[in-house]
Structure formats: C-alpha cells, structure tokens
Image (cartoon, rainbow, N blue to C red):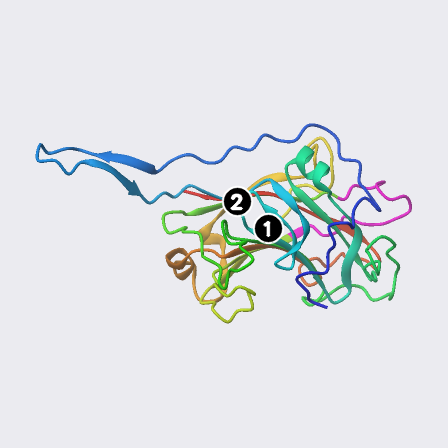
Amino acid sequence: MNTWNNVSRKWRAARSPAVFGAAMALAACGGGGVTTAPDDGGGGGGPSVNATPYSLFASNYVAYASQTNGAFLHSVQGGDVYASFGGNINYGCFSFDQNQMNANQFYAIQAQADSNGGPPNGTNCQSNSNVPPTTAADFAQVTIKAPGTNSPTATSVAPLDISQSTTMLVQMGNIYTQGDVPGAIGGNATVYTVELNNDTSASQNGSAQSALCSFDQTLATIGRGATAPLGVLNYVIPFSSFTCSNGTMETMKSTGVTSVTIRYSGDKNPNLQVNELDVIAVGYVGFSK
C-alpha cells in the first residue's frame, strides 16, 4: 500500500506517548532580504531584492477542519503534509492532535509493522501478519509540500528557491520511548532517509521531476531522554551529503524544492521487528549556508 491520504486527523491518542517538557523555541533563519541601492545622484536608488540562502520551508503544523487536497494538516507556511505507508508497515493508531502539535512544535505519527491500520477510523490497530519489514517497500514516511502551495485549485507545486543555500536544517526524531505502550516493542527505526524532490506536479507523481535526492541520517538518539527531552534533535545536512537517483543536487539547487520527505524503511533499518512501533516526528525544515 502506498497512499497519500490514509491518515485521519481524528486518529489520535490511541497509543499516546507521554511527551514531557516545554517545546523548543524555533526561530526562522535571518539574512538576505531587501537592501537599499546607493543613490548616484541621478536618482534610481531604492529597494532591491537579493536572493537569500536562508529560508524556512516548514514549521508549526495546523490541522484542517476536514480533509483538504487529500491532506489532514498543513504547515503554517501553507504546505500540505501527508503520511503514507507501504508493504509490511502501516499506520499505528496514534498521531498528534492540534493541542499536541501546539505544545511540542512538531508533528508526530506512529507506524506499526504488520498492522492493519485500525480500520475503519484508525483507532484499533491489529496485527495482520508476522512478516518482518526488511525491504525498501516496507516504509513509513511524512511528506511536506513547499510553502504557499496548498490552494485547493492549485494545478502544480511551486518550488522553494534554494539556489543560494548549501545546507539543509531539519528537526526530527523517532520519539517512541520504551514503556509508552506496555508490552510493546519498538524504536528500532534508527535511520531516517531525508528526501528532496523538485517535482512540480500537483500529485507529486514524478511526472514533472528532474531531480530526486536523498541522505540517510542516523538518528543520534531514540525516544525521550536526557539527550532529547522531547525525542527530537536538530540535524544539519550539507548538500554535498545528498545522492540523487534522478538528476543532481546542482539541478535541485537551480530548480528549487517542491517537497521534503522523512522516511524510514526496512532495507535501511535491519533491526525492525514484527509488530514493532516507531513514531516519526518532524518539526521545522529549512535551508541555510
């Protein structure tokens, strides 16, 4: 199964991790912007716009009142957010509601190996197999579209300019913490694949894509603890670390980014077990020098 719209906004708190502490304060990167050109005495001075390497792709997530564009939430920058699952990994009957997103300043959704996804409304997940999730087809992911692209009438996705940037910044983690669900196993998704896409098609189906680049980030910690009280950390990923299955990072820089995906999959996480739980958390996403 690989679907963009199989996560209900109402599917929340069935297996709610107890998230403690105040949320990290997030500030947008500064720099670039409007400068004033010198006046040579003949007039013609005034404001001009310089390209900037500093941009905030997404932060602070908001639930729609009802499903919109196939999504149940969006970033405050106006980019829709989708969760999807494949193979022997499915929805795990827990995701943050609006109060939890407000309190923690990130979005989180639980995935479960060999889950049936809790039909019909995602509140009672049951095991439907005993097959370990070991392949690339076994995955859970969160995809965020570029800012200002969530109009219901949009026929394409406008990319965010990263032509002056050299680094990606992302707050993320696997916030599943042992003991959250008595008797359950989990937290073995320790490598997240961070993917940049420049596909301008509204469905992000690859039909208007000239670059797709990714980096496998080993998470520095799993769950909530002294290192990460909320379970998330800030990661800095140089563009030079990305590899591309289509095009190049130079193409990505010249064309811009239309979506960012955070994924874990069976082929990159060999210790995933039958029925285990993992919780993808994503906060701010940005680009810098």
Residue drawn at x 72%, y 36% as measured from the top left: 99
Mark 2 and mark 1 lie on one chain; the one further toward the N terminus is 2
Toward the viewer: 67 or 26? 67
Q: Amino acid at mark 2?
A: Gln
- Callout 1 crowding tier (Cα within 10 Å): few <14, some 14–19, many ≥20: some
Quadrant of residue 100 in the image? top right
Residue on which disc 1 sits: 217
For the record, the magenta segment spans 176-191
Q: From the viewer's perspective, is residue 218 above or below residue 140? A: above
In the picture, measured across the screen, residue 46 lies left or right of residue 224, that is left
Q: Does the stretch in magenta take in 241?
A: no
In the picture, measured across the screen, residue 175 lies left or right of residue 217, that is right
Q: From the viewer's perspective, is residue 136 above or below residue 192? A: below
Residue sticking out furthest to the bottom: 207
Total numbered labels placed on residues in the image: 2
Q: From the viewer's perspective, is residue 22 above or below residue 272? A: above
The image shows residue 41 at horizontal and vertical percentages of: 9, 32
The image shows residue 175 at horizontal and vertical percentages of: 72, 42
Quadrant of residue 18 in the image? top right
The disc label shown at residue 77, or none:
2
Toward the viewer: 111 or 34? 34
The image shows residue 200 at horizontal and vertical percentages of: 47, 63
